[in-house]
Image: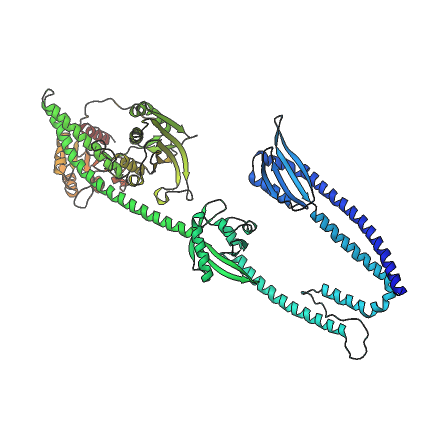
Amino acid sequence: MTVARRLILSIAAFSFIVTLLSTALQLYIDYQENLDEIEAGFEDIRETRLPNLTHNVWVLDEEQIQLHLDSLINTDNIEYVSIADSEQTKWLSGVVRSEKTLQAEFPLKLDNNGHTFHLGTLKVVAGLNEVFDSLKSRALINLASNAVVIFLIAGFFLIVFQYQISRHLLTLSNYARNIKLESNQPPLKLQRKQSGASKDELDDVVSAINLMRTNIESSFYALRESEQYNRMLFEQSPIGLALNHVDGQFVDVNPAYARIVGYTADEIRQMTLWDLTPSSLHDEEVEQMRHLRKKSPTPPFEKEVIHKDGHLIPVQVSYHLLEREGLRFIGISMEDISDRKASEVALAKSEEQLRQSEKMRAVGELTGGVAHDFNNLLAVVLGNAELLEEDLPADSPAQSFLKTLISAATRGAELTSRLLAFSRKQMLSPTVTHVEDLVDNMADMLKRVLGENISIKTTYGPDLWSCEVDQGQLENVILNLAINSRDAITATNKGAGVLSIEISNVVIDGEENQFQEEIVPGEYVTISVSDDGIGMTRDILDRVFEPFFTTKPVGEGTGLGLSMIYGFVKQSGGHVTIYSEQGMGTTVKLYLPRTKEEKKEQVAEMEAQSPKTGNETILVLEDDPDVRELTVLQLKSLGYNVVQAHDGQSALEVIETVQQIDLLLSDVVLPGGMRGPEVARKARESKPNLSVLFMSGYTQNALDSHSDLGESSMLLNKPFRKKELAEKIREAIGH
């Protein structure tokens, strides 16, 4: 061994020992600083994060608690955090990976109204693996840098080698280490003198490095363009795309896929395909995977996936088998078809509603027409019975038969009234009504109807609005519903129950309209009548509003109760819904339009008195000869002068020939193409002061299109009693 080599070795040995000592000292100082930083982090947690976390634990805000724990895990060196009480760990995040750790525990205490609540203990574990790894790296750097110093000191003896070879090797390594593909970096060139054109090994290495740089740069640009294009398609695609391992573990997903299932991309990467597949579809999913191995891609098929909030989402999916870097992956393309499915359901529902609406309209037209004709017949029966009753002595044996006849005709009139209610052609007298007052006034009657075994519970919302309805009809509606509830509760084994009546305000807008075209958006007063009775099946629910449909035994119900309710509410501009479950009970909800008019004081009705008479001249216009003859007889018995006509043309002729006519009493629907309102309008052209009273089996709606007749045009509903006829005539003439 030469002196030069021994000197180099001595210098190297001495320098190595100094380097070790200085490095060890520096590492110790750095280690203490790292520990101090960890302790400072613990103190920061105590001062800044502990109060918020304590509050979240107090209010049991699961999401915020987990966010706090996750944010602590993202802090330097923190590997594990948990919150536990004396019995178990409630929340945790992270995993302890380091063999050497530092940990701190912070009690979660909350002072509230002078009381201290111990909510648990926050445990924070900091791993030292990163600290040790950092120290190792620093040690290596220190040793390497000091080694350079050693070599510089020893370089005096190696200057020739350094000048000829070492400096060029360093140039080569530095150039290779600092290659920048996206810069105008010049080719590698060694700074040395060389005689002639001869080349040595260093020149070959320089040429190889320059060629390698050119090839790497070309490949980099091509790969970057391809990656950018594919990533753009992946990220911007409206269809959900995902890449999975063959075992179902997610590798990557695009934003569209994440939106469909409701998770973030990071959350999905921690999941498998089976986590998003309902257990009932696992077998079908396995079959799709088996098909994928035979043929890729799979044909698009429909399935359901589990959203983050737990509900199922219908999707259309296709699987693709892919290979990358020698590994096999599953590519998934998925499209949310919830809107399409919802449209299909909505279309089916609309078609069913249209069929039901058309059926109810047709039945309504039929029942309305039957009721109108039947009213004419009842008018004849009831009127003649009343005339006969007046002519017979009070002690005549026939009086009992007449009373029975009048009672039967009256019940028939009630039946036609219900038919007209369903067909929305009944006569209504709407007034401004506070529904809660009406229900309170019915309390005693409802208790008598329901009996002792059924209790009544009423619930009124705040600041209830008013509605404009026929109070008598509304009372009948509530009474009918109460009777139905009583029968439903009685049919249960317990025989006792609760009838609940709830009144509240509700605003229906375009988005909240659950009934689509069936209810107009606006402000409504709702009346909910609920019971805990036997309930109804779906088949019965579909038919409850049909006239003459009843579930009661023969002879115990007409089947017109709910149909009358349906027609009354619709005619009042509202809506009615019914919900029922077998064994649970039934709820009927009425929606009545709000009115902003003030409630008027009602005048007490006069006590019963004899029919009002008069001596004016009345023109009776009626196409039905029996009804016309009866009406003429009733008017004459009341003292009036009567002329008559059977159609519009003959009535106008009578008006032209008779000098004094005080009242036109006309049917609304007449033969010959000229209706009653049109006759009245033409008659007033020659007799402007002529009073008009219409009679019809329909309602005031028949006059709505003739507003030019004025308020003096009134309506008398068939069939009518003699007293009603007398009062209406005096009222019409008195206008």
Left or right of 360: which side holds 379? left
Report x, y in % for residue 401: 12, 26
Residue 641 visible in rendering: no
In this view, the residue in front, 143 or 349, is: 143
**Outermost residue toward the right?**
3
Report x, y in % for residue 354: 31, 47
Residue 582 visible in rendering: yes
- The coloring applied to the image is rainbow
Quadrant of residue 386 within the rendered picture:
top left
Report x, y in % for residue 441: 34, 24
Determine whether 708 is above or below 463 in the image. Answer: below
Q: How many marks?
A: 0
Determine whether 254 is above or below 97 in the image. Answer: below
Quadrant of residue 482 within the rendered picture:
top left
In this view, the residue in front, 659 or 128, is: 128
**Outermost residue toward the bottom?**
196
In this view, the residue in front, 615 or 406, is: 406
Quarter occupied by the N terminus: bottom right
Quarter occupied by the C terminus: top left
Left or right of 692: which side holds 227? right
Determine whether 426 is above or below 245 in the image. Answer: above
In this view, the residue in front, 166 or 442, is: 166
Left or right of 183: which side holds 240? left
Report x, y in % for residue 577: 34, 38
**Outermost residue toward the top?**
395
